[in-house]
Image (cartoon, rainbow, N blue to C red):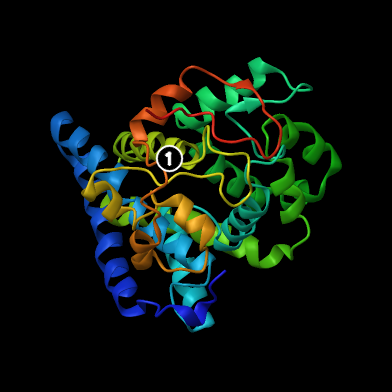
């Protein structure tokens, strides 16, 4: 696995993109709140794409490749996090846990295990990944941490709601970390949105329209880039074909197999790390297949079940 020294981190470019992307999201929220329904829908569609940019910059910071300076890396990761919105530390814990658990029994949503309910798994696929409620769980989980942080160390919460919703491993990881930093980051994320509402005079309809459009796109992408891939921790992902604009705004996030194979590679290097001999399905091919529901899980180590001509 290449280390950080192998790549030159494009810090200045990352900062420039951050300085452009965040105000762009503000403008789109304002348009959705103060324009006719036609313009509001157009703004929401644009927001669903543009808000992936600060999210992807935060993703770079999670892996320590926004900046070679750790302090600046974490500062910008924190500054990007309210766009989701989330705590940067929570996101880091969850995402690095994802890299450890990818395609294992603890993180498998396109399949159901013999001891699992197919109906429950389908609820997670349809409501969570396809209807956008996976995104809604992010601000809700941050709000829970803000008002009742003790729940994250509560056995009843971990083995109850967290287990039923498929988040138990993440909650257990979070419970091992100091809570004060996370609490202040959650407070910052919510304060950011309160400030936007006051300064831009946003309406709840405009804000919700934008964020639900983003939720539909973001929630789907989080599993489309893994669904039906090999049951392998590292290779269980896809390099997805996507429109250049969509892929560019997401900072090559669609090259997800390349990212899992080279998690310390900054986003600018991912295109050259894509193996042209490997299948590259389109986003939509896997997205529509997910609507068919979960299937019985093959064993760990099984190859991809997405068939190619």
Q: For this rendering, which residue is in front, 145 or 97?
A: 97
**Is residue 101 visible in this depiction of the protein?**
yes
**Is residue 202 visible in this depiction of the protein?**
no
Image quarter of residue 187: bottom right
Give percent across and percent down for residue 56: 40, 58
Q: Which residue is drawn at 32% across and 67% down?
A: 18
The number of numbered badges drawn on the structure is 1
Considering the image in quadrants, where does the C terminus appear? Answer: top left
Q: Determine whether the residue tagged by mark 1 lies in a helix, strand or loop.
A: helix
Image quarter of residue 34: top left
Give percent across and percent down for residue 193: 41, 53
Residue under numbered circle 1: 221
- As displayed, is residue 250 above or below residue 45? below
Q: Residue at x 43, y 40 (%)?
A: 221
Give percent across and percent down for residue 169: 73, 45
Q: Residue at x 46, y 41 (%)?
A: 225
- As displayed, is residue 261 above or below residue 294? below
Q: For this rendering, which residue is in front, 241 or 45?
A: 241
């Amino acid at each position: 696995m290449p280390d950080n020294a192998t790549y030159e981190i494009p810090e200045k470019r990352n900062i420039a993109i951050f300085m452009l992307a965040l105000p762009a999201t503000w403008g789109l929220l304002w348009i959705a709140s103060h324009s006719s329904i036609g313009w509001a829908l157009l703004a929401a569609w644009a927001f669903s794409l543009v808000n992936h940019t600060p999210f992807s910059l935060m993703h770079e910071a999670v892996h320590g490749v926004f900046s070679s300076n750790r302090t600046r890396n974490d500062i910008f990761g924190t500054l990007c996090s309210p766009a989701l919105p989330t705590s940067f530390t929570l996101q880091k814990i969850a995402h690095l846990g994802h890299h450890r658990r990818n395609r294992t029994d603890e993180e498998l949503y396109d399949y159901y295990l013999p001891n699992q309910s197919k109906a429950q798994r389908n609820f997670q696929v349809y409501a969570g990944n396809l209807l956008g409620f996976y995104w809604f769980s992010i601000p809700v989980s941050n709000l829970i941490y803000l008002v009742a942080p003790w729940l994250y160390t509560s056995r009843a919460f971990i083995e109850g709601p967290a287990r039923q919703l498929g988040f138990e491993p993440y909650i257990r990881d979070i419970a091992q970390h100091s809570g004060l930093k996370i609490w202040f980051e959650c407070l910052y994320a919510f304060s950011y949105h309160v400030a936007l509402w006051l300064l831009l005079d946003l309406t709840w309809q405009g804000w919700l329209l934008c964020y639900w459009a983003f939720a539909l796109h973001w929630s789907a992408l989080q599993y489309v880039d893994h669904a039906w891939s090999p049951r392998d921790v590292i290779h269980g992902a896809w390099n997805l074909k996507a429109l250049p604009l969509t892929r560019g705004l997401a900072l090559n996030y669609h090259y997800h197999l390349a990212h899992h194979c080279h998690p310390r590679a900054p986003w600018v290097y991912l295109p050259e790390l894509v193996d042209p001999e490997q299948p590259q399905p389109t986003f939509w091919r896997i997205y529509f297949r997910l609507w068919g529901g979960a299937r019985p899980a093959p064993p760990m180590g099984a190859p991809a079940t997405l068939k190619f001509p």
